[in-house]
Each structure stands twice: as C-alpha cells, then as structure tokens.
Image: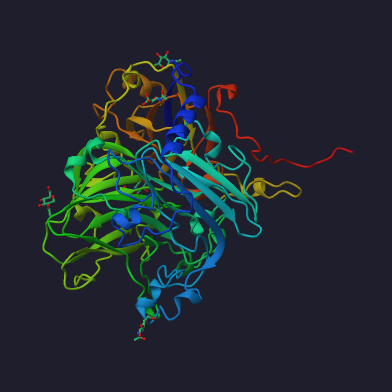
Amino acid sequence: MDIVIIAKVLVSLVYIFFNYTEILKEAETKLKLTTSVNSFQPDNVGESYEFSSEDDSISCTRECTEQTLPRLCHYRFVLENYNVLSLACQNCRQNMSQCYNPQCIAADGYERGILTVNRMLPGPSIQVCYGDKIVVDVKNEMPSQSTTIHWHGLFQRGTPFYDGVPMITQCPIVGGNTFRYQFYANQPGTFYWHSHDGIQKSDGLQGSLVVRRPRDHEPNGQLYDYDLPAHVIVISDWSHRPAIDHFPGLMKPVTATYETFFLINGRGRFTDPVEGTTTTPHSVFRVHPGKRYRFRVVGAICIHCPALLSIDGHNLTIIDTDGNSVKPVEVQALHLHSGERHDFILSATNEVKSYWIRVKGGSTCAKMESSHQKAVLQYQGAAETEPREPGIEDEDVSSFGLIMNPQNATCGEGELGVCVSQLEAAEPIDEQILKPDPDVNSTIIINYLFPTVKELYQSNTFRRYSTPRMGANHPFHLHGFAFNVMAMGNLKDTEMNAENIVSLLKSNQLQQSSAPPLKDTIAIPSGGFVVLRIFANNSGFWSMHCHYLDHHMAGMSLTVQVGDPKDNPPIPAGFPKCGNFVPLD
Ligand SMILES: *[C@@H]1O[C@H](CO)[C@@H](O)[C@H](O)[C@H]1NC(C)=O
Ligand SMILES: *[C@@H]1O[C@H](CO)[C@@H](O)[C@H](O)[C@H]1NC(C)=O
Ligand SMILES: *[C@@H]1O[C@H](CO)[C@@H](O)[C@H](O)[C@H]1NC(C)=O
Ligand SMILES: *[C@@H]1O[C@H](CO)[C@@H](O)[C@H](O)[C@H]1NC(C)=O
Ligand SMILES: *[C@@H]1O[C@H](CO)[C@@H](O)[C@H](O)[C@H]1NC(C)=O
Ligand SMILES: [Cu+2]
C-alpha cells in the first residue's frame, strides 16, 4: 500500500524578515554582557536532581524565570566504546548499591559492549534556559568510527551547519577529532540529541535536551507546580546484541537473541529464561504528595517498537508535543514513536506509596515477551521504593482506556484514542498556515521496494542491501522546522488519493483540529497519509526521513532545500570539508 505524505510548503516572503548575521550579533552581545562561566558543564542531571541554589550558580540546569540572565553552557562530550557492567560496577549484580558507582552502567543487567558519551547511558542531559548559548565539544574517541550529533527538534536557525547530518550539513567527525557545535537555545521545549551517523544511537549515543522558559510564559504553566530536571523520561529500545547485528540484520535470528527490550533512563531489568529476573535498579521518579508535576518524555526509540507509557493509579494530562504546547488532554496512556516527545502533567494526589511506571512495546514488538520495562513513581514518605503490586506485563492495550497517539492512528470511527491531528495548538498559529492555498505543494509517496535476490546479488555489482519488513507505520522527522499537522487519515477502503486529499483539505473536510498542532516528528499511519504545512523561512538543506534506523539506512530519506544556497547563513571560517580522492592520472 502506498503511503502519502502531502507536504504543503508555504514559501512566500521568506527572506524579507530577517538577517541571520544581525540575529547572531544581537545574541552574542547579550551573552557577552552576562556570561561569567566558561568551564565545562557538569553531567549532573540525575535521579534526584532538583533545583538548588548551590548548583544554580554554576550549572545551566537552573530555574528559568523572567529575571534569569542567559548563560554560556559549555559541554564536553567524549564518545567511547564502553560496556554495560564494566569493572566500575564491581558487584552490582549481587549488591544493588554498587550499580550507582560512578561510571557504572548497569542497564538491564545484561553485559554487552556499547557506545557512550561521558560513560553515561543515556548520555548527559542538556537542560538550559531559553536564550542560553549551547556549546558542545564532541570528541570522537571511537577508533575506526566517524560520528555527528543531531539536536533533534532544534531548528538551527542561523546555524544550519550545526544540524549534524553527515555529508549534508557537515563532514563526519573522524576518530580522534573534536568538533564544536554551538547554537542558541532559542526554542523552548523537550528535545533530544543523538548520533546521526550510521546506527550508533542504537548502541547508546543519545540523551535529552530541554529548554525551559519562565513558567508564566508557558500556556499551560498554571496547571503544574514543578518542572524538575529529574522528571525527564528517556525511553529507549534496547538489545542484547550490538546494533550492527540488526542492520542489515541476521537471516536466521534466534528469537532469544533478537529480542527487543526497553530501558527507562538507561535502567531496568530483564528476565532470563534460565537465570530469572535481574536485580539491577529501576529508575525512580520522586514526587511530593498533593503536587502537580510536568514530566517530559523522549521517545529515544530506534526501531519499529513504539512505546506505550502508563502510570499505575494516575492519568496523564498531555500538554505538549515535540516542544509545542497543546490544549490539555487527559488520557490513561501515551504512545510514543521513534523521535517523538510528549510532556504531561501528573497530579500526585493518589495514596502515598510507590507506583509502577510501565512501558510496553507496540507494533512489531507487541507480541515480544521481552518488550517492556518498568520504572518507579515514588511519593515522598512512601514506606518502600518498589511497588508491592506485581508487574503485569501482558495487559491488554484496550484496558488502558484513552490512549494518546494510538497505533495506526487515523482516528476514524470507532477508534479509541486521541490522534496528534486532533490536538489543538495552545499558541496562536500563523494565519498564513491556515490559508486554503499554499504557495507550493509537494507530494511524497513512500513505499518499499522489494528487489529479488537475483537483482541484489549479481556478480560484480553491489546493490545496497536492505531487509524491509511490512506493516509498520513510519515516523517521519523533518529537520529545521516544526510542521502544522493539517490532517491524517487512512487510504484503505476509501477513494482517497493524492489529488483529492488536497481538495478535501481545501473544502475543510479533512482537518481534524481547529488549531492544527505543531510537531517535528509524525507517525504516518500504515496505509494512510498525513498533510503537513511549513512556513519556509529557515533557509538551508534539511533532512527529512523515517526515524526508524533501518528504514533511514535503507534510503527512506530525502533532503528539503529551502532558499538558495546564497541565502544560507555564512559557514564558519575553517569549517572542515571532506571528499573523495580519486586522481585521474
Ligand atoms: C554493598 O556495597 C556497598 C557499597 O560498596 C557496601 O557498603 C556494602 O557493604 C555492600 N553490601 C554487601 C551485603 O556486601
Ligand atoms: C482518570 O480518568 C478516568 C476517565 O476520565 C477517570 O475515570 C479516573 O477517575 C481518573 N483517575 C484519576 C486517578 O484521576
Ligand atoms: C518563521 O515562520 C514561523 C511560522 O510562521 C514563525 O513562527 C516564525 O516567527 C518565523 N521566523 C522568522 C524569523 O520570521
Ligand atoms: C496547490 O494545490 C492547490 C489545490 O489543488 C491548487 O489550487 C494550487 O494551485 C496548488 N499550488 C501550486 C503552487 O501548485
Ligand atoms: C496496524 O496496521 C498494520 C498493517 O495494516 C496491522 O498489521 C497491525 O495489526 C495494525 N496495528 C494495530 C494495533 O491496529
Ligand atoms: Cu519507516
């Protein structure tokens, strides 16, 4: 079945509005006046990190109020080959307290080689205030691997060369080299960073990035009491084999070794059929009874395993998607696809005890026994850390009630859930986005190509190998922009096609929200379509691709050129170049 993305690009009035050099100069001046810190930021955003005045004096992770002055936030990322349960962990498998040793990565208690930034899993959390400048020195200490880091969701307005897409915005950073990324935190929201080179993020090269603004400026700021650094939830799919075994993939996978697991902030447990369940620690999120908390969830997921998140005894009030505020929606569970972020409010108004936070795999992982993980929501004053209730791993999804962003979400009749296309933006939408006719229409049809074995393997030809799998939806991510989600739907059993989708949209028969929300990653339903609009005022070469690693690797990727290269901001002096060396003589 064809899948249609109809991208409607509004390209008028692009370059009249601003001048990159002016924007940068103004920000630099502001920063020079107020910057006193020039040392590296600590990697200190851990489980118990709340704002404290001591940390606030040096750390960019601080409360962001109207009085907050911008800071220069300088991070050092050292990328290495490392391992789960290294010597740093001592006897962590028997003595849980040792799992918290410095540089110990316990993960789910299964020893394997991984890739890390600063020997952390996930890597350091960058948490800054709106207006700060983020500088990251990425030192590649992985021999024989090149790398880049992409700052997922940040538009890189004025700095497209720091978008971190290898061979499109920069030459990959080779082993032993350091590359400095520097850009302004000029969008509030929940983002993340990850390697954009090859399949490295699957092995551990990713972490969260949060930009806070004063709560008074948040459309939903009055609905919660706290927005704490420790309340960022990074959900990642996990494997007990190195990523390279999955890409392109093994032909005869032994189910037990091919299984997909999950980690929550790099922690969890798994059940070995012989040795039983590991005793590594779960992530713990602490709350005070009676208070309302903003949680920020990152779907740091690499493959076709969307994560269904729920918290025993609590509803989730969704207030933000991909860094864009939406009108609050109360649900019982939240579905996240690869690359998506959602923020929710949790009211700690239930009985004072501990509750399970549950993650369960969907799509191709729905039937996999390994595909779940738990973390703990602990009320201050609760007698024990671990909830007494058993972990129910096989709960029927339908028992959850209302699900935000359900699977195959087209939100047709009879479907229980809230689709992202039904959310309403909480901040005003540019009127030009809503005008019936965009300036440019572009239809992108995505599908699989199934070459025959004969076509793939002819002597003296080398064709890119891929192992396509059916039935999946495709979470597409666009760099450089957030798009308004105008419509989303199903092409099955309907007369719809690329042509009439546009006219139906024009006659207002498709739009599901009076204020189409902004996102930068969207799951295109299996056999369905999405209609997206952008106001093309950020010139550069922007990658747009399926966020499933294997699909991206297999070519489900394109580049959107906005503006003429001469409109692009000037490239920094000495920016490294790469290329072939094939002398003709
Ligand atoms: C567990 O490890 C901690 C920290 O190293 C140590 O203080 C404690 O004695 C250990 N407990 C046991 C039972 O070995
Ligand atoms: C969660 O929402 C459901 C449906 O609206 C409601 O019945 C239930 O009482 C709510 N639970 C809590 C803990 O607020
Ligand atoms: C670019 O367009 C978006 C959407 O209309 C708007 O919110 C933003 O302010 C514009 N940026 C500039 C620099 O004009
Ligand atoms: C885009 O599509 C609409 C609806 O079919 C059409 O009216 C309009 O002329 C198209 N615009 C361009 C620039 O092709
Ligand atoms: C989603 O759609 C695919 C393909 O149509 C199907 O195989 C799968 O069962 C659907 N998943 C759900 C949860 O409906
Ligand atoms: Cu895909």
* In-front residue for pair 514/17: 17
Does residue 69 appear anywhere in the picture? yes
- Location of residue 430 (image quadrant): top left
Position of residue 33 measured from the top left corner of the image (x, y, whole percent): 43, 37
221 shown above or below 201: above
Position of residue 308 measured from the top left corner of the image (x, y, whole percent): 30, 53
The colouring scheme, among rainbow, by chain, secondary structure or one colour, is rainbow
54 shown above or below 240: above
339 shown above or below 325: below
The quarter of the picture where the C terminus appears is top right
* In-front residue for pair 582/303: 582
Apparent side of residue 61 relative to residue 143 in the rendered image (left or right)? left
* In-front residue for pair 398/218: 218
* In-front residue for pair 323/514: 323
- Location of residue 428 (image quadrant): top left
8 shown above or below 386: above
Position of residue 146 measured from the top left corner of the image (x, y, whole percent): 62, 52
Pick out the residue farthest to the right.
Answer: 585
Identify which residue is drawn at 73% across, 46% down: 461
How many numbered discs, if any? 0
Identify which residue is drawn at 18% across, 48% down: 225
The quarter of the picture where the N terminus appears is top left
Identify which residue is drawn at 59% across, 37% down: 168
Apparent side of residue 51 relative to residue 312 in the rendered image (left or right)? right
Identify which residue is drawn at 37% across, 81% down: 95
Position of residue 64 measured from the top left corner of the image (x, y, whole percent): 30, 44
Does residue 413 appear anywhere in the picture? no
